[in-house]
Image: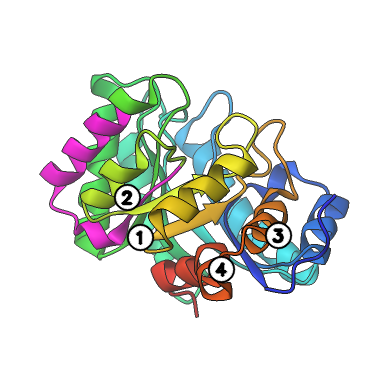
Amino acid sequence: MPAPPLLPLFDAHLHPEALSDQDLESMRFFGVERALVVSHHFPEPTPKALRKHFDDLVNRQLPRLERLGIRAWAALGVHPRCIPRRGLSEVLASLPEYFQGGRGVVALGETGLHEGGIEEEEAFLEQLALARQLKLKVVVHTPAVDKERHTRRILTLLLQSGVRPSRVLVDHANGRTVRNILGCGHWAGLTLHPDALKADRAVALVRRLGSERLVLNSDAGDGAGDILGLARVANLLAKAKLSERVVKRVAAENAARFYQPR
Protein backbone atom coordinates (compact mmCIF):
# COMPACT_ATOMS: atom_id res chain seq x y z
CA MET A 1 0.00 0.00 0.00
CA PRO A 2 1.44 3.44 -0.92
CA ALA A 3 2.24 5.99 1.74
CA PRO A 4 0.09 9.12 1.66
CA PRO A 5 1.74 11.41 -0.94
CA LEU A 6 3.13 14.78 0.03
CA LEU A 7 1.41 16.40 -2.96
CA PRO A 8 -2.36 16.92 -3.33
CA LEU A 9 -3.92 14.85 -6.12
CA PHE A 10 -6.65 15.60 -8.67
CA ASP A 11 -8.37 12.42 -9.90
CA ALA A 12 -9.59 13.49 -13.32
CA HIS A 13 -11.95 10.56 -13.99
CA LEU A 14 -14.10 9.15 -11.20
CA HIS A 15 -17.40 7.24 -10.93
CA PRO A 16 -18.32 7.72 -7.25
CA GLU A 17 -21.83 6.28 -7.57
CA ALA A 18 -20.20 2.83 -7.69
CA LEU A 19 -17.90 3.51 -4.70
CA SER A 20 -18.61 3.34 -0.98
CA ASP A 21 -17.97 6.19 1.43
CA GLN A 22 -15.11 4.12 2.82
CA ASP A 23 -13.55 3.88 -0.66
CA LEU A 24 -13.75 7.63 -1.09
CA GLU A 25 -12.42 8.28 2.41
CA SER A 26 -9.43 6.07 1.59
CA MET A 27 -8.81 8.02 -1.60
CA ARG A 28 -8.94 11.27 0.37
CA PHE A 29 -6.54 9.91 3.01
CA PHE A 30 -4.07 8.98 0.27
CA GLY A 31 -4.08 12.45 -1.20
CA VAL A 32 -7.06 12.93 -3.56
CA GLU A 33 -8.26 16.45 -2.79
CA ARG A 34 -10.06 17.17 -6.08
CA ALA A 35 -11.92 15.02 -8.60
CA LEU A 36 -13.86 15.10 -11.83
CA VAL A 37 -17.02 12.98 -11.79
CA VAL A 38 -17.70 11.63 -15.28
CA SER A 39 -21.02 10.31 -16.60
CA HIS A 40 -20.98 6.58 -17.19
CA HIS A 41 -22.82 3.71 -18.90
CA PHE A 42 -25.57 1.49 -17.54
CA PRO A 43 -28.12 -1.05 -18.87
CA GLU A 44 -31.24 0.07 -20.73
CA PRO A 45 -30.39 3.73 -21.27
CA THR A 46 -33.49 5.80 -21.99
CA PRO A 47 -33.70 9.60 -22.15
CA LYS A 48 -35.39 9.55 -18.73
CA ALA A 49 -32.71 7.26 -17.24
CA LEU A 50 -29.90 9.41 -18.66
CA ARG A 51 -31.36 12.61 -17.21
CA LYS A 52 -31.79 10.82 -13.87
CA HIS A 53 -28.11 9.81 -14.06
CA PHE A 54 -27.06 13.40 -14.76
CA ASP A 55 -29.20 14.66 -11.87
CA ASP A 56 -27.72 12.07 -9.53
CA LEU A 57 -24.16 13.07 -10.38
CA VAL A 58 -24.82 16.79 -9.95
CA ASN A 59 -27.28 16.77 -7.06
CA ARG A 60 -26.04 13.80 -5.01
CA GLN A 61 -22.53 12.72 -5.94
CA LEU A 62 -20.88 16.14 -6.06
CA PRO A 63 -22.20 17.11 -2.59
CA ARG A 64 -21.30 13.64 -1.29
CA LEU A 65 -17.69 14.04 -2.37
CA GLU A 66 -17.55 17.53 -0.88
CA ARG A 67 -18.88 16.14 2.41
CA LEU A 68 -16.06 13.56 2.39
CA GLY A 69 -13.43 16.25 1.86
CA ILE A 70 -12.96 16.03 -1.93
CA ARG A 71 -13.75 19.11 -4.03
CA ALA A 72 -15.55 17.85 -7.10
CA TRP A 73 -16.85 18.89 -10.49
CA ALA A 74 -18.66 16.96 -13.23
CA ALA A 75 -18.53 16.13 -16.92
CA LEU A 76 -21.87 15.14 -18.44
CA GLY A 77 -22.49 13.46 -21.78
CA VAL A 78 -23.70 10.27 -23.45
CA HIS A 79 -21.17 7.45 -23.22
CA PRO A 80 -20.89 5.39 -26.45
CA ARG A 81 -22.13 2.34 -24.49
CA CYS A 82 -25.13 4.33 -23.27
CA ILE A 83 -26.72 5.67 -26.45
CA PRO A 84 -30.53 5.41 -26.21
CA ARG A 85 -32.36 3.62 -29.01
CA ARG A 86 -34.60 6.65 -29.34
CA GLY A 87 -34.47 10.16 -28.00
CA LEU A 88 -30.77 11.09 -28.18
CA SER A 89 -31.68 14.56 -29.44
CA GLU A 90 -33.97 14.97 -26.44
CA VAL A 91 -31.10 14.14 -24.08
CA LEU A 92 -28.70 16.51 -25.83
CA ALA A 93 -31.30 19.28 -25.74
CA SER A 94 -31.41 18.94 -21.94
CA LEU A 95 -27.64 19.16 -21.46
CA PRO A 96 -27.10 22.95 -21.80
CA GLU A 97 -29.08 23.70 -18.63
CA TYR A 98 -26.55 21.71 -16.59
CA PHE A 99 -23.77 24.04 -17.70
CA GLN A 100 -25.58 27.09 -16.34
CA GLY A 101 -26.03 28.50 -12.88
CA GLY A 102 -22.80 27.37 -11.25
CA ARG A 103 -23.83 23.73 -10.90
CA GLY A 104 -20.25 22.49 -11.09
CA VAL A 105 -20.44 20.97 -14.58
CA VAL A 106 -17.22 21.89 -16.39
CA ALA A 107 -17.06 19.58 -19.43
CA LEU A 108 -19.02 17.40 -21.83
CA GLY A 109 -18.28 13.71 -21.54
CA GLU A 110 -17.63 10.93 -21.50
CA THR A 111 -18.34 10.66 -25.23
CA GLY A 112 -16.38 8.93 -27.99
CA LEU A 113 -16.34 5.45 -29.55
CA HIS A 114 -16.44 2.00 -27.99
CA GLU A 115 -17.26 -0.55 -30.68
CA GLY A 116 -17.46 1.99 -33.51
CA GLY A 117 -20.06 2.11 -36.26
CA ILE A 118 -22.48 4.67 -37.63
CA GLU A 119 -24.63 5.02 -34.50
CA GLU A 120 -21.69 5.73 -32.22
CA GLU A 121 -20.05 8.10 -34.69
CA GLU A 122 -23.25 10.10 -35.19
CA ALA A 123 -23.80 10.39 -31.42
CA PHE A 124 -20.17 11.45 -30.99
CA LEU A 125 -20.38 14.09 -33.72
CA GLU A 126 -23.66 15.47 -32.36
CA GLN A 127 -22.09 15.91 -28.95
CA LEU A 128 -19.00 17.52 -30.46
CA ALA A 129 -21.26 19.95 -32.31
CA LEU A 130 -22.92 20.83 -28.99
CA ALA A 131 -19.53 21.29 -27.34
CA ARG A 132 -18.41 23.56 -30.16
CA GLN A 133 -21.60 25.59 -29.92
CA LEU A 134 -21.33 26.02 -26.14
CA LYS A 135 -17.50 26.27 -26.14
CA LEU A 136 -17.15 23.34 -23.76
CA LYS A 137 -14.20 21.16 -22.84
CA VAL A 138 -14.70 17.52 -23.93
CA VAL A 139 -13.72 14.18 -22.33
CA VAL A 140 -13.37 11.47 -24.99
CA HIS A 141 -13.54 7.73 -24.30
CA THR A 142 -11.27 5.28 -26.10
CA PRO A 143 -11.94 1.54 -25.69
CA ALA A 144 -9.64 -1.19 -24.42
CA VAL A 145 -10.30 -3.44 -27.44
CA ASP A 146 -8.70 -2.41 -30.75
CA LYS A 147 -7.65 0.87 -29.13
CA GLU A 148 -5.27 2.04 -31.86
CA ARG A 149 -7.80 1.74 -34.69
CA HIS A 150 -10.59 3.38 -32.72
CA THR A 151 -8.31 6.16 -31.53
CA ARG A 152 -7.27 6.95 -35.10
CA ARG A 153 -10.94 7.20 -36.09
CA ILE A 154 -11.69 9.37 -33.04
CA LEU A 155 -8.88 11.75 -33.97
CA THR A 156 -10.24 11.99 -37.52
CA LEU A 157 -13.75 12.79 -36.27
CA LEU A 158 -12.38 15.36 -33.84
CA LEU A 159 -10.59 17.08 -36.71
CA GLN A 160 -13.79 17.08 -38.78
CA SER A 161 -15.83 18.48 -35.88
CA GLY A 162 -14.08 21.81 -35.74
CA VAL A 163 -13.70 21.66 -31.96
CA ARG A 164 -10.44 23.28 -30.92
CA PRO A 165 -7.91 20.53 -30.12
CA SER A 166 -6.89 22.30 -26.90
CA ARG A 167 -10.46 21.84 -25.60
CA VAL A 168 -10.34 18.04 -25.90
CA LEU A 169 -8.93 15.44 -23.52
CA VAL A 170 -8.71 11.98 -25.12
CA ASP A 171 -8.82 9.55 -22.22
CA HIS A 172 -7.54 6.02 -21.53
CA ALA A 173 -4.47 6.59 -23.72
CA ASN A 174 -1.63 4.08 -23.72
CA GLY A 175 1.90 3.82 -25.06
CA ARG A 176 0.66 3.12 -28.59
CA THR A 177 -1.83 6.00 -28.81
CA VAL A 178 -0.59 8.81 -26.58
CA ARG A 179 1.87 10.30 -29.08
CA ASN A 180 -0.78 10.62 -31.81
CA ILE A 181 -3.20 12.23 -29.34
CA LEU A 182 -0.64 14.78 -28.18
CA GLY A 183 0.56 15.31 -31.76
CA CYS A 184 -2.95 16.40 -32.76
CA GLY A 185 -2.87 19.08 -30.06
CA HIS A 186 -5.21 17.32 -27.62
CA TRP A 187 -4.68 16.52 -23.95
CA ALA A 188 -4.17 12.86 -23.07
CA GLY A 189 -5.57 10.99 -20.08
CA LEU A 190 -3.53 8.15 -18.61
CA THR A 191 -5.92 5.85 -16.73
CA LEU A 192 -4.41 3.85 -13.87
CA HIS A 193 -6.72 0.87 -14.05
CA PRO A 194 -6.18 -2.93 -14.24
CA ASP A 195 -7.84 -2.93 -17.66
CA ALA A 196 -5.96 0.12 -18.94
CA LEU A 197 -2.51 1.13 -17.72
CA LYS A 198 -0.32 -0.36 -14.98
CA ALA A 199 1.49 1.98 -12.59
CA ASP A 200 5.00 1.16 -13.77
CA ARG A 201 4.01 1.71 -17.41
CA ALA A 202 2.48 5.09 -16.55
CA VAL A 203 5.71 6.12 -14.85
CA ALA A 204 7.70 5.07 -17.93
CA LEU A 205 5.43 7.14 -20.19
CA VAL A 206 5.75 10.25 -18.04
CA ARG A 207 9.52 9.79 -17.90
CA ARG A 208 9.67 9.54 -21.70
CA LEU A 209 7.07 12.15 -22.68
CA GLY A 210 7.33 14.70 -19.90
CA SER A 211 4.34 16.39 -18.31
CA GLU A 212 2.93 18.59 -21.08
CA ARG A 213 -0.84 17.94 -21.54
CA LEU A 214 -0.73 14.61 -19.67
CA VAL A 215 -3.43 14.02 -17.04
CA LEU A 216 -3.55 11.06 -14.64
CA ASN A 217 -6.79 9.49 -13.43
CA SER A 218 -8.07 6.28 -11.83
CA ASP A 219 -11.46 5.63 -13.52
CA ALA A 220 -12.35 4.21 -10.09
CA GLY A 221 -15.90 2.92 -9.96
CA ASP A 222 -15.71 1.29 -13.39
CA GLY A 223 -15.37 -2.39 -12.59
CA ALA A 224 -12.45 -3.79 -10.63
CA GLY A 225 -10.40 -0.61 -10.41
CA ASP A 226 -7.67 0.63 -8.11
CA ILE A 227 -8.82 3.39 -5.76
CA LEU A 228 -5.19 3.99 -4.74
CA GLY A 229 -3.85 3.98 -8.30
CA LEU A 230 -3.23 7.71 -8.46
CA ALA A 231 -1.45 7.79 -5.09
CA ARG A 232 0.62 4.77 -6.10
CA VAL A 233 1.84 6.40 -9.31
CA ALA A 234 2.56 9.72 -7.59
CA ASN A 235 4.84 7.88 -5.18
CA LEU A 236 6.48 5.89 -7.95
CA LEU A 237 7.11 9.08 -9.94
CA ALA A 238 8.85 10.61 -6.94
CA LYS A 239 10.90 7.44 -6.36
CA ALA A 240 11.90 7.50 -10.04
CA LYS A 241 13.64 10.84 -9.35
CA LEU A 242 11.27 12.84 -11.51
CA SER A 243 11.07 16.44 -10.41
CA GLU A 244 8.39 17.62 -8.03
CA ARG A 245 7.24 20.00 -10.76
CA VAL A 246 6.58 17.11 -13.17
CA VAL A 247 4.75 15.08 -10.52
CA LYS A 248 2.58 18.07 -9.55
CA ARG A 249 1.65 18.69 -13.17
CA VAL A 250 0.55 15.19 -14.13
CA ALA A 251 -1.05 14.37 -10.76
CA ALA A 252 -2.99 17.59 -10.23
CA GLU A 253 -2.08 20.82 -11.97
CA ASN A 254 -2.73 19.77 -15.57
CA ALA A 255 -6.26 18.59 -14.72
CA ALA A 256 -6.98 21.86 -12.93
CA ARG A 257 -5.56 23.81 -15.86
CA PHE A 258 -7.59 21.89 -18.44
CA TYR A 259 -10.94 21.94 -16.63
CA GLN A 260 -10.35 25.30 -14.92
CA PRO A 261 -12.81 24.53 -12.14
CA ARG A 262 -13.76 27.43 -9.91
Q: CA distance from mark 1 to mark 3?
A: 39 Å
Decide which of tag 4 and tag 1 comes sooner along the chain: 1
Q: CA distance from mark 2 to mark 1?
A: 7 Å
Residue pointed to by mark 4: 252
- Image coords of residue 220 (percent x, y): 67, 44
Residue type highlighted by circle 3? Asn
Q: Are marks 2 and 1 in contact (CB under 8 Å)?
A: yes
Q: Marks 3 and 4: which is nearer the front?
A: 3
In the image, residue 97 sits, relative to residue 244, either above or below, namely: above
Decide which of tag 1 and tag 3 comes sooner along the chain: 1
Q: Where does the magenta region start and end? A: 150-171
**Residue drawn at the location 51% of the way across and 68% of the way down:** 246
- Image coords of residue 147 (percent x, y): 38, 26
Q: Residue furthest right?
A: 22
Q: CA distance from mark 4 to mark 2?
A: 32 Å
Q: Is residue 98 visible?
A: no
Of 133 and 10, nearer the camera is: 10
Left or right: where 48 falls relative to 198: left
Magenta region includes residue 155? yes
In the image, residue 202 sits, relative to residue 174, either above or below, namely: below
Residue 93 tag number: 2
Residue pointed to by mark 3: 235
In the image, residue 190 sits, relative to residue 154, either above or below, namely: below
**Residue drawn at the location 27% of the way across and 56% of the way down:** 131
Left or right: where 8 falls relative to 44: right
Q: Would you identify the image quadrant in which residue 175 lies?
A: top left
